[in-house]
Every structure is written in structure tokens, then in C-alpha cells.
Image (cartoon, rainbow, N blue to C red):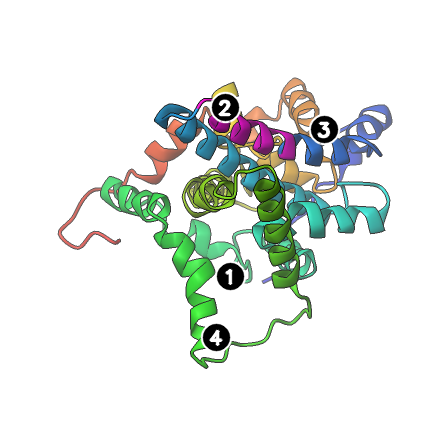
């Protein structure tokens, strides 16, 4: 199928407005990376200082959400908007964002730009993330249970490695890269620092557990919020959903303005820190009726879990 229709920003924004929302900062991207790691360290330190079940759960939620945040910043770098210097943009993504959570910018960038080119069409590599919905509430609960119990983590992260150890060959990636090296260097650094500080157990309890539980769940929620049940039409303002997240949702589910996804798809080279401003301008210009906008992730869940229960309900 042909590529989806693109939006010409000059037909919507004045030159001054477009300059303001499209301008990249040389410090805000690195500051967001630093902020993500500061939250991770702070959440871990809170549990170490006040060890109890509540602070541990809070730490897992905050760290898992910031692991998603690191993946989102890698996504930002895939568009070249994490830093105006291309080499620094890619280095930040490879070593401080994607690397620690197992991502590969070199592999992700062509994959993701294909998603933008063919959003919700048969050629869209992310179509499988939105196609199953709506599902039943029971199916939704089972998906979340698999996420929170580490089953999704095992299937996506560990099982492929075990298969390779068993001699099963996998189709080589089109782009040659070694994300495993960056991942294990990052893990060694985290384990080394926590061990030197006297908390050798923190790597497993405060990095791997969030990665195996909350990170998969909020990644699923992110995908559901962005494209599930958007009823895509030719109008590019219908290709993705914006979810009006509250402060708690932004803290625990949708960091770094990722919930402004309609704005991102329409203007994919606008830096994430300018998406809220872009949203406000679109509201002022009367675009709300053309856009797919949902009030919060609870509404996303209600829509995505709206299929009636049957004897043969999907998993």
C-alpha cells in the first residue's frame, strides 16, 4: 500500500509557531536522560533507606517506568531529536538509553520509521501490537498477569537466548549491531557500583525485577494507548491516539510526553519536550474533533477490554 498521508506543518502553524515547537535544544535531551537515571537511583535509594514492602513496590514502579522512559528516549533519538549533534544523539541512545534496557538504535530506527511510513497498514511492523483489540476483560487480565509475573520478560528476553544456546539458529538481523555487548556492559556497571556501595543484591532486586515486571506491563499499556482501536482513516490526525494523562499516569505509565502520540505522528521531528506545546496549539486551532483523544489510561483499558466474553475468548 502507499505510504500514509503526511501533514505539512506550514498549513497549520505560523512560521514563528513552527520554529518554537520544532526547535531542538542542546541541553534538554541530555537533561532528560540524566533525570531518568536520577529517578532510578532515587527510587532505589528510598527503598535502601526505608526497606519495607511499600517502598519496594514504589521503587519497582518508578524504576520500571523510567526503564520505559529510557526506551522512549531511545525512540526520540531514532528521530534524531534527542540532541542536535547526530553523533551525540546516537551515543546517548546506544549507551545511556537503549543499551541498559537491551535496545539497539541501529536496528530500531529503520523499523520504527517504517512504522511511521505505513502506520496501521499491512506493512506496519507494529500492527500486531494494535490488531488484537478489543479483547475481553479476562484476556486483558491474563496479559497483565503474564507481564507482572515475568512470563513476558522470559518469552521476549530469555527464551531466545536459551534457544540459541541449544543450537537453534535465528534469522540474522538486517542491520549488524551488538546490543548484547552494551546491555551486559551496562549491567556490569550497575552491579559493580551497587556492590562497591555494599548493596550487591540491588542489581537483581532494583533493576532486573522492575525490568521483568512493571516495564513489560507499561510497555503494553503504551502500545495500547498509542494505536489500539484508533479507527484509522486517510486523515493523518486519526493515525494515533493522544491520551490525556494525569500526573500519576505520567509518573508511573507515560513518561516524557509519550502520551501525545497523535502529535508525534503528525509532526515526528518535533522533540518530545515540545509535544505538549504542539498539543495546545492544535487545540487552539480547532483540531480536537479530528484527533483521537482519550481521557486517561483507564478509558484506554475500558475500550481495549470491551469485547464480550464468549466460550472461546482469546488469551
* Res 105 → quadrant: bottom right
Question: Relative to 2, is 15 above or below?
Answer: above
Q: Is residue 252 toward the left or the right of residue 29 in the image?
A: left
At x 63%, y 42%, the residue is: 193
Q: Is residue 97 visible?
A: yes
Question: Does dot 1 land on a helix, a strand or a loop?
Answer: loop
Check residue 41 for magenta coloring.
yes
Magenta highlight on residue 164: no
- Secondary structure found at label 2: helix
The residue lying at 56 percent from left, 36 percent from top is 66
Residue depth check, mark 3 versus mark 4: number of the one nearer the observer? 4
Pointer 1 or 4: first along the chain: 1
Image coordinates for residue 196, horizontal then vertical, percent: 61, 42
Which residues make up the magenta segment? 37-50
Spatial distance from mark 4 to mark 2, Cα to Cα? 41 Å
Q: Nearer the viewer, mark 1 or mark 2?
A: 2
Q: Position of residue 95 (x, y in %)?
A: 70, 50
Q: If the image is split into quadrants, where does the N terminus sit?
A: bottom right
Label 2 sits on residue: 49
Q: CA distance from mark 1 to mark 2?
A: 51 Å
Please name which of the two marks, 1 or 4, marks the residue nearer to the observer: 4
Crowd tier of the residue under label 3, counting other residues whose Cα lies within 10 Å: few below 14, some 14–19, many 20 or above: some
Q: CA distance from mark 3 to mark 4?
A: 42 Å
Considering depth in this image, is 29 or 110 the residue closer to the camera? 29
Chain-order first, disc 3 or disc 1? 1
Residue underneath mark 1: 122
Residue where numbered disc 4 is placed: 164
In this view, the residue in front, 197 or 40, is: 197
Graded by Cα atoms within 10 Å as few (under 14), some (14 to 19) or many (20 or more), the crowding at tag 4 reads few
Q: Residues within 10 Å of mark 1 (few under 14, many from 20)?
A: few
Amino acid at each position: 500500500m502507499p505510504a500514509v498521508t503526511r501533514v505539512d506543518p506550514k498549513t497549520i502553524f505560523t512560521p514563528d509557531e513552527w520554529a518554537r515547537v520544532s526547535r531542538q535544544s542542546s541541553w534538554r535531551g541530555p537533561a532528560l536522560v540524566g533525570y531518568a537515571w536520577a529517578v532510578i537511583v532515587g527510587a532505589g535509594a528510598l527503598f535502601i533507606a526505608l526497606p519495607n514492602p511499600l517502598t519496594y513496590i514504589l521503587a519497582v514502579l518508578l524504576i520500571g517506568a523510567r526503564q520505559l522512559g529510557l526506551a522512549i528516549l531511545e525512540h526520540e533519538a531514532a528521530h534524531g531529536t534527542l540532541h542536535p549533534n547526530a553523533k551525540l544523539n546516537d551515543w546517548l541512545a546506544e549507551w545511556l538509553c537503549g543499551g541498559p534496557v537491551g535496545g539497539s538504535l541501529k536496528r530500531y530506527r529503520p523499523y520504527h520509521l517504517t512504522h511511521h511510513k505505513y502506520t496501521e497498514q499491512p506493512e506496519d511492523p507494529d500492527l500486531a501490537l494494535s490488531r488484537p483489540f478489543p479483547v475481553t476483560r479476562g484476556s486483558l487480565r491474563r496479559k497483565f498477569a503474564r507481564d507482572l509475573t515475568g512470563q513476558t520478560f522470559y518469552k521476549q528476553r530469555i527464551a531466545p537466548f536459551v534457544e540459541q544456546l541449544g543450537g537453534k539458529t535465528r534469522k540474522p538481523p538486517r542491520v549488524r549491531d551488538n546490543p548484547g555487548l552494551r546491555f551486559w556492559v551496562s549491567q556490569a556497571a550497575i552491579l559493580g557500583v551497587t556492590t562497591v556501595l555494599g548493596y550487591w543484591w540491588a542489581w537483581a532486586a532494583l533493576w532486573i525485577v522492575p525490568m521483568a515486571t512493571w516495564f513489560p506491563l507499561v510497555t503494553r499499556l503504551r502500545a495500547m494507548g498509542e494505536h489500539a482501536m484508533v479507527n484509522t482513516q486517510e486523515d493523518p490526525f486519526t493515525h494515533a491516539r493522544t491520551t490525556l494523562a494525569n500526573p500519576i499516569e505520567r509518573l508511573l505509565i507515560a513518561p516524557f510526553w509519550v502520551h501525545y502520540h497523535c502529535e508525534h505522528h503528525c509532526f515526528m521531528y518535533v522533540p518530545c519536550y515540545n509535544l505538549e506545546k504542539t498539543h495546545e496549539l492544535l487545540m487552539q486551532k480547532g483540531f480536537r474533533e479530528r484527533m483521537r483523544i482519550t481521557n486517561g489510561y483507564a478509558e484506554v483499558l475500558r475500550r481495549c477490554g470491551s469485547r464480550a466474553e464468549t466460550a472461546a475468548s482469546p488469551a
